[in-house]
Amino acid sequence: MTSTATPQIIANRRIAITAGYYAAFIVLGLASASLGPTLTGLAENTQTQLSQISYLFLARSVGYLLGSLLGGRLYDRISGHWVMAIGLIGIAISLSLTPLIPLLWLLIGVMVLLGISEGSLDVGANTLLVWLHRDQVNPFMNALHFFFGLGAFISPIIVAQAMLISGDIAWAYWMLAITALAPAAWLWLQPSPLPISDKKSGLRPIVNAALLGLIMVLFFLYVGAEVGYAGWVYTYSTTMKLGDPARAAYLTSSFWGALTLGRLLSIPIAARFRPRTILLVDLVGCLLSTALILIWQSSQLALWAGTIGLGLFMASFFPTLMNFAGRRMTITGAVTSLLFVGASTGGMFFLGSSDSSLSHSDPRSS
């Protein structure tokens, strides 16, 4: 985006680049929601117990943490679109290999690679979108996370249909892998937005360490709850005999579908209400939805209603928190990577806790 370009050319480039970010986040959603419904199939492929295959979640979270830290440094130094394209290619390779690997330790290595690719891509899209749209980023940020939810909503449906048609999970993973190639090529060819200059942007250049730490904690709690619930609700439903495998896959999809709908609704809501108001409503809604599931543990209706409620109220939390942070500090690759460190550690902690509690509730584990 050179200074000699006309306003129309600049606007067209922004549209093209933004579309590339949205496509990349659809791929990120597809990949993120693929593991939960396929855990049983991966356990069969590697001839391991469900409690052992759950280490894939931990490996993926470790990779995500590494990808967030490494990606944040790279986006401040080299072309961000090249980094995003490489991350998309890494997702494609990881997904292609996942159903073919018969050894758990080797599959754990692939999950680390997948997490690295996802972490760098996640940091990149959130950072570069701010650099691209500057102080007009709020609706674009909510839309970005809507497209993540869209991909996550579609993913379990693809898995369920592939299992019904072919009887295994391989074709589902290969279909998901193919979707990463087009946005990778598109972003590689687009010019990257320049980092925000504190002197030109007028944003506060000093980062409040206490505020940054608080937002990291909130990301820790939110992402841990989101990926923990989405990753284990399929297994929880089948273990507690609240649905067969196909219905459990659709239950996972309903969570992501509600999340997607909530993020679509959050775009106009974000323009009318303060971030702190939205965050408060989200927290109260999540608590009520969780209480519904815990009080009526043997009810399929309560599980479905609570799952949909959690998806709706979790929907706007992440983008609203990003917008909140962007209003109070200068967003660089390094700052975004620190925020996503909180997110990735939350995923590791809560998935590990879910693994422990679920193994104790499964009668086959005793």
Image: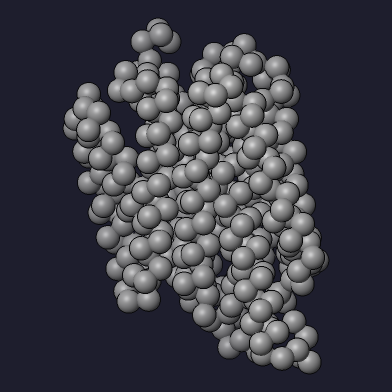
Going 42% across and 18% down the picture, which residue do you hit?
359
> Does residue 69 appear left or right of residue 225 in this picture?
right
Position of residue 184 measured from the top left corner of the image (x, y, whole percent): 73, 55
Which image quadrant is residue 272 in?
A: bottom left
Position of residue 295 measured from the top left corner of the image (x, y, whole percent): 19, 32
Residue 343 visible (yes or no): no
Q: Which of 73 and 24 is in front in this view?
A: 24
Going 61% across and 86% down the picture, which residue do you hit?
201
Q: Which of 188 and 134 is in front in this view?
A: 188
Position of residue 216 measured from the top left corner of the image (x, y, whole percent): 50, 57
Q: Which of 219 and 164 is in front in this view?
A: 164
> Does residue 321 appear left or right of residue 338 in this picture?
left
Considering every residue shown, the one lying at the far front of the view is 165
362 versus 258 height, above or below = above
Going 39% across and 28% down the picture, which residue do you hit?
248
Q: In which quarter of the image is the N terminus?
A: bottom right
279 versus 168 height, above or below = below
Which image quadrant is residue 13 in?
A: bottom right
Residue 49 visible (yes or no): yes
Q: In which quarter of the image is the C terminus?
A: top left
139 versus 365 height, above or below = below
Position of residue 42 measured from the top left corner of the image (x, y, whole percent): 60, 21
Going 51% across and 70% down the picture, which residue do you hit?
140
> Does residue 97 appear left or right of residue 225 in this picture?
right
